[in-house]
Amino acid sequence: MNAATQDTSSSILVIYTGGTIGMRDSDRGLVAAGDFDSRMAAALASLPPDRRRRLPEYIVWESPDPIDSSSATPDDWAVLAALIADRYQDYAGFVVLHGTDTLAWCASSLAFQLQGLSKPVIVSGAQKPLESENSDALVNLEAALAFAAQTALREVCVSFGGRLLRGCRARKWYTADALGFESPNWPLLGEMVDHSPIVYTPRCWPARGAPRFELAGGDAAVVIRLVLWPGIRAKDVARWLDDDSQRGVVIECWGSGNLPEDEALLGVLARACAEGKVMVAVSQCPVGGVSPGTYASGQTLNEIGILSGDDMTPEAAHSKLAHLLAQDLSPGDLRQRLLTSLVGESGAFTA
Ligand code: ASP
């Protein structure tokens, strides 16, 4: 039977996009490589029989053009979301294998595109290629498949280093450590314990009606990521913001949402807001969020009209803004949806 005639409703669809997990050596270093289906099967066959038996059935969809995710764009995320949406009814869950560099961006974008999921979409990858010595790829594949079969999961997650993180809360934290990712503002959704998946259900996104897919990765070029640094000059910021094609700005402020008290800089930001650019503030601190008004210098955010991004990661804030700008929303609706946690991307966890 081929995939088209097979009953796959209890199977996992594994979507391979590239990344280190499938890379091979070249004379210029690691490069994205194909033939992933048979390589994955060979790797999983090397697991001890009891672990092999616990794996769910799966089918691999391989990108014809696997990439290093440092070249990924929102168009790639839109293709991925459409692929999952097209096959949504046919599978019990989905695994997306992706390079780690932009994996958190992809996971955030998928979360905003695939709202109202009733099954898991697990994004994973590896710090070392599948066939390399001491690779984390095999255990990550095993964990991703195991989590993708968990019916309690109804969201986009990142599975990496034996841990399960909310996708829109994850950040690449380590360049080489097998843990790979952290989720500084939301606790782990699950863990692999003795090679079996444990899901911490109270921390997971609850069932919320039917899927409401909004398939648009957004145009990343219309949203600027503006990271403050001491001494930042108004005229440099103005050069970016005076471009009419820019529609949104994620501004990474100090601490709990503070801006420099520089009249010229504040004037440039205020003018951009007044012209209709949507500005969202997040913190440069990885843990915690912005709470404008704690300091006088933070009060400025409200006065200028910059919206609070609460404790969103910069990746989530950027992909959310790009995603919402791609919808046909009135300014009021856009503002309201930005300030609402749509898929669990913001807001403190209370046990
Ligand atoms: N540069 C690689 C990528 O993002 C890194 C990785 O996958 O770990 O595709």
Image (cartoon, rainbow, N blue to C red):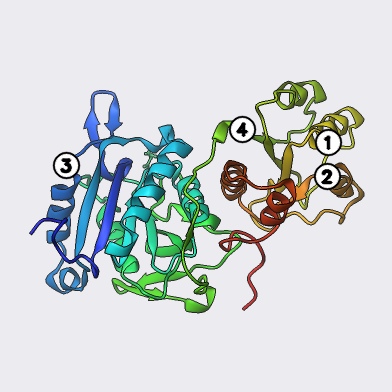
Give the Cα distance between marks 4 and 3. 36 Å
On screen, residue 142 versus residue 323, left or right, reads left
Give the Cα distance between marks 4 and 2. 19 Å
First in sequence: mark 4 vs mark 2: 4
Of badges 2 and 3, nearer the viewer stands 2
Q: Which residue is mark 2?
A: 305
Residue 217 appears at what percent x and percent y? 49, 43
Residue at screen point 67% across, 55% down: 337
Q: Which residue is mark 4?
A: 222
Q: Which residue is mark 3?
A: 35
| Residue furthest left in the image | 1
Give the Cα distance between marks 2 and 1. 8 Å
Instruction: Say what amino acid the circle numbered 4 marks.
Output: Val
The label number, if any, that marks residue 22 in the structure image: none
Q: Which residue is mark 1?
A: 274
First in sequence: mark 2 vs mark 1: 1
